[in-house]
Image (tube, rainbow, N blue to C red):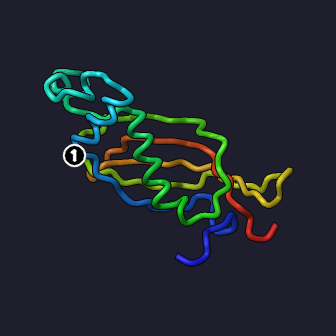
Amino acid sequence: MGDLLHYEDFAVGARYELGSYTLTRDDVIAYAAAFDPQPFHLDEAAAKDSLLGGLAASGWQNCAILMRIIADGYLKHAAGMGSNGMSDVKWLRPVYAGETLGGHMTVLDKRVSRSRPEMGILTCKWVMANAAGEVKVEQTGVNFIRVRTP
């Protein structure tokens, strides 16, 4: 890809498309078996009769999928320096087995660190939606990005 994106390359209000991921039935069940063994994540019949209405991914799996989309579509191309976390995570709708999910990122705010001028601080909102445009997950958090010319 050439040069990595640096702090100066990001604009407040800009939206960046991140790519997509298709969630399979086996993905849902394997993740649930290892990390969130609730019936509506493990068993299609139990899931159909649940509040979710079908085999649905764990909210934590949805965060992991969004992280994968963020890593592939943004972090691999940026001069990242880490993060101090997310301030907000929302699971807005169930994510069902078989859905293809797409993500985008919007830069909400940016500033250069006073104590570390080589580090820019981006506040971003990441959104994951299905192919019909239904928003499934929203996250807001911080990314540290290297400043090209401190």
- Residue at 61%, 75% in the rendered image: 3
Type of the residue with mark 1: Gly
Q: Nearer the viewer, residue 42 or 124?
A: 42
Q: Is residue 91 above or below residue 7?
A: above
Q: Position of residue 143 (x, y in %)?
A: 64, 51
Position of 50 with respect to 5 (left or right) is: left
Q: Position of residue 28 (x, y in %)?
A: 28, 37
Residue 24, by quadrant, is top left
Spot the residue most to the left. 45
Position of 23 with respect to 81 (left or right) is: left
**Which residue is tagged 1?**
98
- Residue at 44%, 40% in the rendered image: 63
Task: Locate the C terminus by quadrant.
Answer: bottom right
Q: Position of residue 2 (x, y in %)?
A: 57, 78
Residue 4, by quadrant, is bottom right
Q: Position of residue 140 (x, y in %)?
A: 56, 42
